[in-house]
Each structure stands twice: as structure tokens, then as C-alpha cells.
Image (spheres, rainbow, N blue to C red):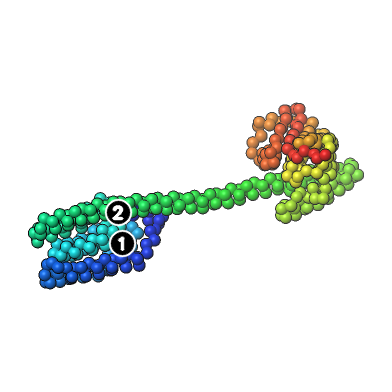
Amino acid sequence: MRIPAGLVGAYTWDRSFRLWDTYFALIWSATLVFALVANFPGWPVRLTAAALLVPLIPLYVLVGRPVLRGDPPDERRALGYLAAALALFLPAAVLVSETQLIAFALVPQCFMTLRLRRAFVAVAVINLAPVLGWALLWRPGDAAVFYNSVFSVVTFVFSVALGSWIIRIIEQSQERAELIAELDASRHEVSRLSAAHGALAERERMAREIHDTLAQGFTSLLMLTQAVEAELETDVAQARRHLSLMDETARQNLAEARALVAGGAPADLDDASLPDALRRLAARQDAALEVTGPVRALPAGPEVVALRACQEALSNARKHAGSSAAVSIVVAYADESLTVSVRDDGGGFDPSSVTGGYGLAGLRARAAEVGGTTEIHSAPGDGTTVTVRLPVPGSTA
């Protein structure tokens, strides 16, 4: 059977030819012996038939074997090889009927190298032509003709049935091999896409971390610098206080950078509770803090999201509401939730008009990662309130 060209490279039929070579050699040897020891016809004819069988060995080794091992077999070369083999086999089988035994070696080769329809034709010639030629040449008795005819027909039917079954098995194996190859390719593609998605997610995470920590810290430093410049000649005490905040903010930024590189918790939460971290944050941002509900230790995920949400909301308030705006933070502990609200009385804005950037989108993404929600209430002239609600484990009695 010829393997479809589309399977080249996707499927290789790994044939072991030692067993097949042994089988071919045994069938050829047995055929040669039967031809020589036959009772009919005489020695000269039997020797002639045996002599016709001898070239089958070099023909198989030099031409047939390479064709059979092709993947897929070259059908043009296979037709040439089988035509040469039949040119040797048919005269020998007509002269001495016992040489028809070699058909058991030739029939499988037809199915291995030819398309199904051509294989059927070749198998019919191999099984039926020798009997017809033998009967016309030697004019045997009716019983001998009937016996040989029935034998050849049965052999032909058996060859077709067995060959068709083998071909179906091989085709199913090829289909499975194709599916395995496709699944393997899909697995590699999924792995590649997963790695790419992981890299993209990591880049997005790093972008959010940098935006929520270092970028906001630098923004605070710039705002404090501007405040100090305005206060140096008019309010030295306030300038000194802002210089102290600049020092604290710079140190905090350095700690955040180290935590970011190390992949640890935010510096504000290092050996501190969430309310303590928010108090330090509120102090740096001149914001008021109110904590309600029973304070308790929470998993790192919700606490990090709550802290980052406050950082982002405070940064936005200072940048957009103005340094003179009053800002307040309310943290509410409930049995199964943690709510953080940041309110400013600045000019407000239209939330639907905000596009792009890492700020609000990053805040929403952070909350969603832990199953939380983010709400933004604002309107021009009416201030802004950012509320983040996070699910947390209930308190234990």
C-alpha cells in the first residue's frame, strides 16, 4: 500500500525487515525445492522453472527491498519491480505448478507498494494467471484443473481479504499517528502560548507594581519638592517637615524597589499590620485614616491589594484633585469582606472619559485577581470616591 504523501514527515512506518527478509528467503527456498522435486513435468522443464526463480533474489535485494523501505514507496519503481518479478514468476508457475508457492511472498509486496486498486489487479494476476496458463499448456485432467482453480480462487479471495484488513489497520495507525503528531504540535503550541501569556502577565504585573510603588513615590517626591520650593522663604518649619517627608518617601521607594526585585511583600507591610501600613501611607500623603470593624490578620493577597488600592487612589487624588484637597481613607473590616474607600473633595471627573494608563485599570485588575470589585464614584465639581471591596475569610471565634 502506498502511504499518502501528506504523511511524509508526520508519520514514518518503522519497518523491521529482518523478519520480512527471512520470510521471503524461506518462501523462495521452499518454492525452489518443490519445483525441483515435483513429479511432473520432466527434469529439463523443472530446471528451467528453477532457473527462472533464481534471479528473484538479486531482483529483490537490489530493487524490491529499497522500494519496500521507501516512505512512501515509489509506486513507479514498485510497478517496474513487480513487472520484472511477474515476468520471472509467471513462466515458472505455468511450467511447474508448484512454483505458485512464491505467490505468498509476492502478494504482500503488492499491498505494501501499490494503491489498493492496482494491488487487487496484481494479486489477481499472481493467483489466477498461472493456473490458466498451466491448464492451457499441459492439458491436465478435469480433477487437477478443478483442484488448482479452486485453490487459486480461494487464495485470491484470502489475499484480498487479508490485504484489505491489513491496509485498514495501517491506515488507522497512520490516522492515529497523524492525530498524535497534531496533538504533539498542539501541545508545543499551547506550551509556547502559555509561556508567552505568562511573560505578558508578568510584564503587566511588573508594570502595575512599578506604577503603584516607584512611580507614585517619585510623583510624591516631585510634589514635595515643589512644596518645599514655595515654602523656603515663607514657612521654613513647613518646608523642613516636607523635607522630612521627602526623606521618608525616598527611603520607602528604595525599600519598595528592593522588595520588588526580591518578589516579596510590599515594604509597608513588612512586619506591620495593614492599618499600621495605611497610617504611615496616610501620614506621608496628609490624609485622614479611619478604621472600623474588628481588625484581624488577613491573607497576604487581600492586604496587598488594599494597600496598593490606597496608594493608587491617593496618588490620583494628589495629582488630579490638587494638594489642597482634603483626602480621607476609610478601612472597614467585616466578617467576610474588607472594604477600602478613598475620598477627596477635589474637582472630580467623568469616569467614563478615562482611557488608557495603568492607574484605574490596574486597580480593577488587582481587585479582580482576588475576587474583589472596584467602584469609582465621581462627577465634575463633586469630588471622587474610590471603593474596593475584597472577599476575606471570616473571623474565628
Q: Nearer the viewer, residue 191 or 206?
A: 191
The reply to whether residue 72 is in sight is: yes
Identify the secondary structure beneath mark 1: helix
Quarter assignment of residue 26: bottom left
Closest to the camera, between mark 2 and mark 1, is 2
The crowd level at tag 1 (other Cα within 10 Å; few <14, some 14-19, many 20+) is many
Q: Amino acid at mark 2?
A: Gly
The reply to whether residue 253 is in sight is: no
Above or below residue 338? Residue 118 is below
Query: Residues under labels 2 and 1: Cα distance?
Result: 16 Å
Residue located beneath label 2 in the image: 163
Q: Residue at x 74, y 52 (%)?
A: 264
Where is residue 163 shown, x and y percent of the image? 30, 54
Q: Nearer the viewer, residue 346 or 100?
A: 100
Q: Nearer the viewer, residue 332 or 244?
A: 332
- Going from N to C along the chain, the mark reached first, 2 or 1, is 1
The crowd level at tag 2 (other Cα within 10 Å; few <14, some 14-19, many 20+) is many
Q: Is residue 310 left or right of residue 120?
A: right
Where is residue 27 shown, x and y percent of the image? 26, 66
Above or below residue 32? Residue 110 is above
Where is residue 381 shown, x and y percent of the image? 75, 27
Circle number at residue 85: none
Q: Residue at x 15, y 71 (%)?
A: 47
Q: Residue at x 69, y 38 (%)?
A: 371
Q: Amino acid at mark 1?
A: Leu
Residue located beneath label 1 in the image: 68
